[in-house]
Image (cartoon, rainbow, N blue to C red):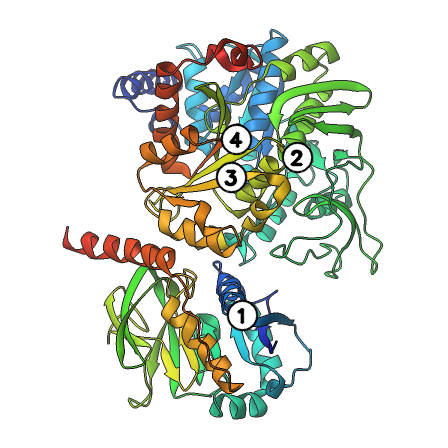
Amino acid sequence: MQNIRKIMAILAGKLLIVLSRMAGNQGTNFPGRLALKIYPPLLKELGKNTYKDTFIITGTNGKTTTTNMIARIFRENGSSFIHNQAGANMLPGITTAFIQQTDFTGRKTFDYALLETDEANVPLLIAQIKPRLILITNFFRDQLDRYGELDTTIKLIKEAVQGTDIELLLNADDPLQVDFQNQKGLKYWYYGFDASNYDSFTGAESREGRYCVLCGHELEYTRYHYAQLGKYHCRHCNNQNPQPNFIAAELLMDPSIHLQIDKLLIESPYQGFYNAYNILAAVSLGKLAGIQEKVIQKAIANFQPSAGRMENFLIRGKKVILVLVKNPTGLNQSLAMLAQDSAAKNLFIALNDNAADGRDISWIWDADIEVITDDKARIRRVICSGQRSGDMAVRIKYSGFGIENIIIKPSLEEGIGIAISMESEVSYILCTYTTLFASRNILARMQKKYPAPLQEKERTPEKAL
Amino acid sequence: MEKFIIAHMYPALMNLYGDRGNLVCLKKRMEWYGLNCEIKSIHLDEKLDFSQIDMIFMGGGSDREQGLVYHDLLKKTDQLMAQIESGLPALCICGAYQLLGSYYKSHEGTVMDGLGFFPLYTEGREGRLIGNILIESEFNGQKVSVVGFENHGGRTYFSDPKLQSLGQVIIGHGNNGEDQSEGMRFKNLIGTYLHGPLLPKNPTLADFFVYAMADRKGLKLEKVLDDTIENLAHEQVRYKMISGQKS
């Protein structure tokens, strides 16, 4: 009888996945939710079909990119694995991923399960599926977390792994992750960055005071890689960065990323320091999973940015880079990344205030927009678009950027058109969530309609897109 | 050049929802008017002579943080209130606005004392009042539309009806969602629930503070700033609210 319910749940889930795909939806959460109603232990049982390792990837930023990079490593290795899609990282979405890839009896086995989930969801997920290891990218407090929710979440994760043999792969440069090592009986690994030419020595204006998680005193930094990630120490209790097991050195961003992880040379078409961290985390996990270095190297080199997490287009011979921005930290990272690109550029920023973007757009004032006024960033124009293009333009104006180079076009199509047609070597298209897919469609259409000159095609590996 | 100092009270504790944008706005506008402005961060236990500064700004924080700030401010109340009486420009947003009243009672029933500067009190209820807000206010005899974003659980009531509100709610909730009032005004002090941040897309309000600061130093501002972008942003969200209400 139990078995029949299980098969029914899988069948219903598979059917719903097909139906919602036909209806044009991603079909990510609902099938899993219904299947769990029909047969509550479904996720627990399907989770046992992984005969090597289950990995959980969590953290505030970068978990989707990191998970996708690891997936690429496993694919390159010829391994079979379960992988939940971005945006489906709660239990129903994860259940959907298992239903989709299992067979009708729910017995098909896989080498690995690669589960991306929100920090707050980790304890719930562990209760269903016991992983070998949890990878944490970073813990960022943003404006939505001034009420100590992050502290609670970290505590819950610590409690959930207490007394288990679950391993942790942690960011040595993140002061919020340091107190996991005080936990008894836990196996933990650390990854971190060596000094780099891209470090800064002062905190940005809006950067919050970073306090020692052990004693509450203010931390001192000798260098910042970005945001609160860097080399820190606490004068009061001598807390400092743990010694990493995986060290990234020789970072070069030209603007694509080159680095060395314990003598292993890694190159990636991604840009920006935050992506260098994603690469370091993915490579560290690949090594812990026992994947050969050559395979890891090849997987990262061939892994192209996807849908909005920095996707490249070539339109009228001009490189156009699409980036999703969701919060001040993400916007800071994107701006820091484009400031490192030495090409002259037009910057397009689309700001909407639908529910998925956040109705409150005041977060743009928590970002350090001021970096765009640096001459070295070589920003020619800023085109503000979307439902709240006016607010964005005001923010740009008060960063000190000249108003003669601020253009307001609420229509995405017109705004993107201007960003590409006006003189510059490259155009950056920054989008909040609900402007992303529309902007992407516009760019894809333009790329098709206005094919690029030949000599430009050769230096962009994305031409097959 | 005359130097102006704006005290940013407790930036590490009271800084929610982009409120620091108000300071970015004031500093830039003063620069454009040809005035030199310094933002001075004031932390807990720091001594501050209110007669030596030109304006104070304080944003909102969580209950715990508001408690810390309350105890620190309590040591400074006499001098601060005297300065406010003599026209010190002050902008108090959300939690800082609530602190100006006699008490804040959370919806669980805990009562936190306020500074008692003005006859108002706040009671927390379940269900936060969240969304874009449009109010009508009056500056220099002119009706002025003010836009912002509110996000508060507390409902603020005036215990003395003679207390002046910042404006009348056209769309949104305001002080309490009942009597159409939003915020309060007293001389050059404004208390309000409006985030957004408030000043950048309400340049009339930003200039209310700039002019008040200049006036107290006996300076006359000749220059007129180009507020095309600010006004466009203002109209964009105002139009969104008005058309959203009709549909």
Depth check, mark 1 against mark 2: the one in front is 1
Residue A128's disc number:
4
| Mark 4 neighbour density, 10 Å: few (under 14) some (14–19) many (20 or more) | some
Q: Please, what secondary structure does the residue beneath circle 4 have?
A: helix
Q: Are marks 1 and 2 on the same chain?
A: no
Q: Which residue is mark 3?
A: A380
Depth check, mark 4 against mark 1: the one in front is 1
Marks 3 and 2, the one that precedes in the sequence: 2
Depth check, mark 4 against mark 3: the one in front is 3
Question: How far, Cα to Cα, is label 1 from label 2?
Answer: 38 Å
Quadrant housing residue A166 = top right
Q: What residue type is disc 3 on? A: Arg
Question: Along the horizontal axis of the image, is A165 left or right of B106?
Answer: right
Q: Are marks 4 and 1 on the same chain?
A: no
Chain letter behind tag 4: A
x, y percent for residue A427: 49, 30
Chain letter behind tag 3: A
Which residue is pictured at 78% across the width and 18% down the height? A264
Q: Is residue A244 among the parts visible in the rendering? A: yes
Q: Are marks 3 and 2 in contact (CB under 8 Å)?
A: no
Question: Along the horizontal axis of the image, is A388 left or right of B16?
Answer: left
